[in-house]
Amino acid sequence: MEKGAYRKALRQAQINLVDLQRDVIARGRRLLVILEGRDASGKDGTIKRIAEHQSPRETRVIALGKPTERERTSWYFQRWVEFLPAQGEFVLFNRSWYNRAGVERVMGFCSDDEYESFLNDVGGFEKILTDDGLIILKYYLDISKSEQAARLEDRRRNPLKTWKISPIDAVALEKWDDYSAARNRMLVETCQPLPWRVVKADDKYTARLTVIHDILRTVDCGGYSGAVPEHDMDVLRYWGTPDISGSFLAP
């Protein structure tokens, strides 16, 4: 996407996000957006553009590190519960409880029993939250192997991005097939009651706008300052509805 067109579209999308936040605050709604995806899939950049002009008092970005020893011995979902939005709040999770279905599974940070238990329990957990009125949107940013390699190399070379480097990065490409298998099972077994919104993210500009526009289309606030484009089926599909197939995903 051309940079000038992207900046113009982003500005209007962010103005619409301000409209949405006013409505969330006025009506006491609770909005949670979950961003998942491989390393370097663009979660940080997408979240930055979503939160950039939101009220810092009512907006929080949560990116938890590895669990403490106490958290490891607690109910798995417990460490996330305290960060869920209260009335009038908009919260973004940069990775979430779905760590267990991705990184923890592939890297061996959880047992087989813990992994299977998570897949069995997460749907019920999310139903409890949504039945209580919480609005949850789940996005998976999907990138190709060549694009991930290029972005990880940029992290190593760019002094402004070295803070993003982690030990997990070193094996991300080596374990590409394992992550693909874990992703596929996660999407199939955790798409109910809330569908996954899978976004092709090789083009960062398009992916960011696609996520923002989908949030705006999904959470009705009674009208926006500007038009909200329909999503491109070649960029975003809902996993858990009939309009998506495995061929949409990077192998």
Image: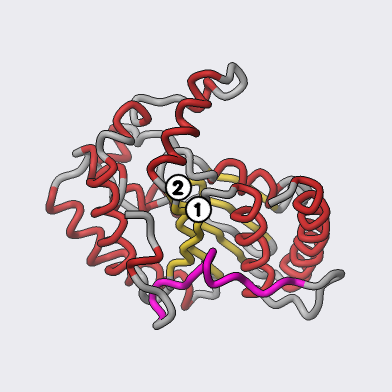
Helix or strand or loop: what does disc 2 sit on?
loop
Residue 105 in the figure: left or right of residue 98: left
Residue positioned 36% across, 75% down in the render: 192
The quarter of the picture where the C terminus appears is bottom left
Marks 2 and 1, how far apart at CA:
6 Å
Q: Percent x, y for residue 190?
A: 32, 67
Quarter of the image for residue 210 reads bottom right
Q: Which residue is mark 1?
A: 35
Helix or strand or loop: what does disc 1 sit on?
strand
Instruction: Single out the residue that lies furthest toward the bottom.
Output: 242
Q: Which residue is mark 2?
A: 95
Q: Identify the amino acid type marked 2.
A: Arg
Classify 10 Å Cα crowding around label 2: few (below 14), some (14-19), many (20 and above): many
Q: Main secondary structure of the magenta part?
A: loop
Q: Percent x, y for residue 240?
A: 38, 76
Residue positioned 40% across, 26% down in the render: 166
Q: Percent x, y for residue 125?
A: 36, 67
Q: Is residue 23 above or below residue 177?
A: below
Q: Does the stretch in magenta take in 230?
A: yes
Q: Which one is earlier in the sequence, the residue at label 2 or at label 1?
A: 1
Residue positioned 59% across, 16% down in the render: 159
Residue 226 in the figure: left or right of residue 186: right
Q: Identify the amino acid type marked 1.
A: Leu
Classify 10 Å Cα crowding around label 1: few (below 14), some (14-19), many (20 and above): many
Quarter of the image for residue 69 reads top left
Residue 72 in the figure: left or right of residue 40: left
- Range covered by the magenta-colored residues: 228-241
Q: Is residue 146 above or below residue 226?
A: above
